[in-house]
Image (cartoon, grey):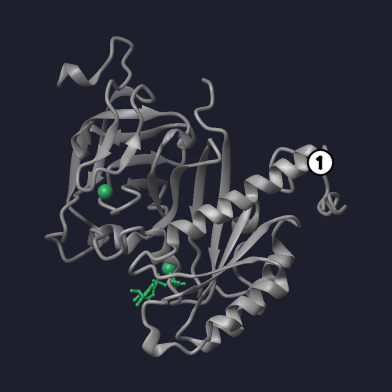
Amino acid sequence: MDETLVAADGKNLRAVLCQRCGCRVLSAGTATLATRELLLPSMKKKSSLADESNPDCELLAEHWLVHDMFTFENVGFTKDVGNVKFLVCADCEVGPIGWHSLEEKSNFYVALQRVRHE
Amino acid sequence: MAKSYDHLFKLLLIGDSGVGKTCLIVRFSEDSFNNTYISTIGIDFKIRTTEIQGKKIKLQVWDTAGQERFKTITTAYYRGAMGIILVYDITDERSFENIQNWMKSIKENAAPGVERMLLGNKCDIESRRKVPKERGEKLAKDHGIRFFETSAKSSQNVDEAFNALATDILMQMSRRAAHGLKDPVDLKSSSKKGSNKCSVI
Ligand SMILES: Nc1nc2c(ncn2[C@@H]2O[C@H](COP(=O)(O)OP(=O)(O)OP(=O)(O)O)[C@@H](O)[C@H]2O)c(=O)[nH]1
Ligand SMILES: [Mg+2]
Ligand SMILES: [Zn+2]
């Protein structure tokens, strides 16, 4: 974990950007670091599995957590997959970059490994 | 926590299947990532931040599927929408004629004061044009709404159109505020539909 990313109070020191196109997802100081193991489908261009309903997944533990979806500067929400909506870049739709469960109305996670920092 | 923005506007895209609604909310359609998994699930809505007249505005833009035409489109989508973007395809006459039906659907389902805007999309393929620009202009004028010809492909007029609609909503809000009226779309208020009928002009 890179310390230049997190302030003493756990907030993000730097803005969160799309890895691919640089679109601004979160401004600095708006999200809190949270550790939680979440399963996110691969960001690979084409799933190596033919079955799209069962894509490759990756277990990710470090996330930026926000409690109000309108904290996001720019983001896309997928349609429901079971009880989950995935988050994608609003401009180029690369993703999933994050995770939201319909059972936890005010938790929105963005995986550190799937974004870059300003 | 203090709100980090001044206003939140919910916008809805409607129109026949294939007119380009989904492409209109993907800003760089040519350049988009096309992850097979994401395109299979589909995008429900996007949140974008923009600044208009010095105000920080959050736009929540909802896509809808044109196939669920007219009747089955869920009123839940219309509920809370402050701006509705009606889209037709300039190369598809039928999609233009159907705008009347979409207008009817808005009247039946959306809040009375909702801002509307008409877009003639796919203006990059002039060679296949079926609907003259004047017809779009006339229809918009008859309904007293804004009109743009857009191309989701070249992004011509796309940002302009979204910003124009957001500006109209902002202006309507300040006009209403000046007259001490409530916003036409207020999720928290339990006031009955149609209680804001008096003219503000
Ligand atoms: N040339 C051109 N093609 C476009 C434009 N916008 C969309 N298309 C194409 O039109 C087709 C349909 O676009 P969509 O955005 O999926 O249409 P839609 O309105 O979302 O359709 P439904 O989801 O079925 O209601 C796609 O093949 C797009 O590539 C445009 O501005 N120019
Ligand atoms: Mg669509
Ligand atoms: Zn991106």
Residue at screen point 59% across, 57% down: B77
Specify the farthest residue to the left.
A48
- Vertical placement of residue B186 versus A11, above or below: below
Ligand 1 within 8 Å, label 1 CB: no
- Vertical placement of residue B177 versus B195, above or below: above
**Residue of label 1:** B181
Residue at screen point 52% across, 32% down: B5
- Vertical placement of residue A28 versus B94, above or below: above
User: Is residue A82 in view from this perspective?
Assistant: yes
Q: Nearer the viewer, residue B133 or A118?
A: B133
User: Is residue B104 in view from this perspective?
Assistant: no
Q: Quadrant of residue B109?
A: bottom right
Q: Residue A27 at what x, y percent from top left?
A: 36, 30
Q: Residue B19 at what x, y percent from top left?
A: 46, 76
Q: Nearer the viewer, residue A40 or B65?
A: B65
Q: Chain of mark 1?
A: B
Judge left or right: residue B136 versus residue B43: right
Q: Quadrant of residue B181?
A: top right
- Vertical placement of residue A16 versus B41, above or below: above
Judge left or right: residue A100 versus residue B73: left
Judge left or right: residue B184 versus residue B85: right
Q: Residue B34 at what x, y percent from top left?
A: 24, 62
**What amino acid is found at the position of numbered circle 1 in the picture?**
Leu
Q: Residue B167 at what x, y percent from top left?
A: 59, 49
Q: Nearer the viewer, residue B130 or A86?
A: B130
